[in-house]
Amino acid sequence: MSLRQRVEVAVVRLILEHAQAAGFVPHKVDDGEEPVETRTADQVLCEVFNRDICDIFFTHASHPKQNYWVKIVLGNDGDDCICDYGTDGAEFDKMMEEVCAISEYGVISFARCPGAQPAWDAGPNNRGPCIRCGEHHLL
């Protein structure tokens, strides 16, 4: 897996982690041809990385009929894979603004996890989820 691809995986995981923390649940990945129902982060990752362009749709318990979405375009620089997002909800916009700031100003680090895999710094204090194992390591 190239560095660009590892960064794309980290950015999509960041979206999913922040969405879950804010109460948003992924329910569909759509590439414009065949929408696929999803319920877990692993299902979303699998579907997103089998396409070049797609939308991830989310719901929230407080607004079950509202669709929140993020458009992902893979294959550019990695950290710019978030192409667009939309909703009428301020909660989702706030969450995505935070995700975009982290993905744009995050740091790629070559610190190693115990499995000797690159880690990605997704936040302050040089801590972030390892791309390979998903654990948080002090970088």
Image (cartoon, rainbow, N blue to C red):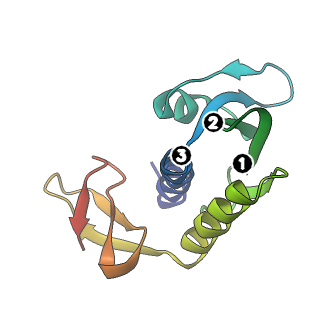
Residue ID at (54%, 30%): 46
Tell me the distance, in whole angstroms, between the alpha carbons under discs 1 and 2: 8 Å
State the residue at coordinates (49%, 49%): 13
Structural crowding at the residue carrying mark 3, measured as other residues with C-alpha within 10 Å and reported as few (<14), some (14–19) or many (≥20): many
Residue at 35% x, 73% y: name it.
109
Q: Which residue lies furthest to the front in this view?
A: 62
Whole-percent x and y of residue 14?
Answer: 50, 55
**Residue 101: x percent and y percent?**
61, 74
* Location of mark 1 (residue): 72
Sequence-wise, the earlier of marks 3 and 2 is: 3
First-in-chain label (1 vs 3): 3
- Asked if marks 1 and 2 touch (Cβ < 8 Å), the reply is yes
Given residues 17 and 50, the one toward you in this image is 17
Please identify, in this view, whether the residue under mark 1 or under mark 3 is nearer the observer: 3
The answer to which quarter of the image holds residue 61 is: top right
Left or right: where 1 falls relative to 22: left
Q: Is residue 89 above or below residue 127?
A: above
- Residue on which disc 2 sits: 48
Classify mark 2: residues with Cα within 10 Å, few (<14), some (14-19) or many (20+): many
Query: Badge 3 is on which residue?
Result: 16
Q: Identity of the amino acid at label 2?
A: Val
Quarter location, residue 124: bottom left
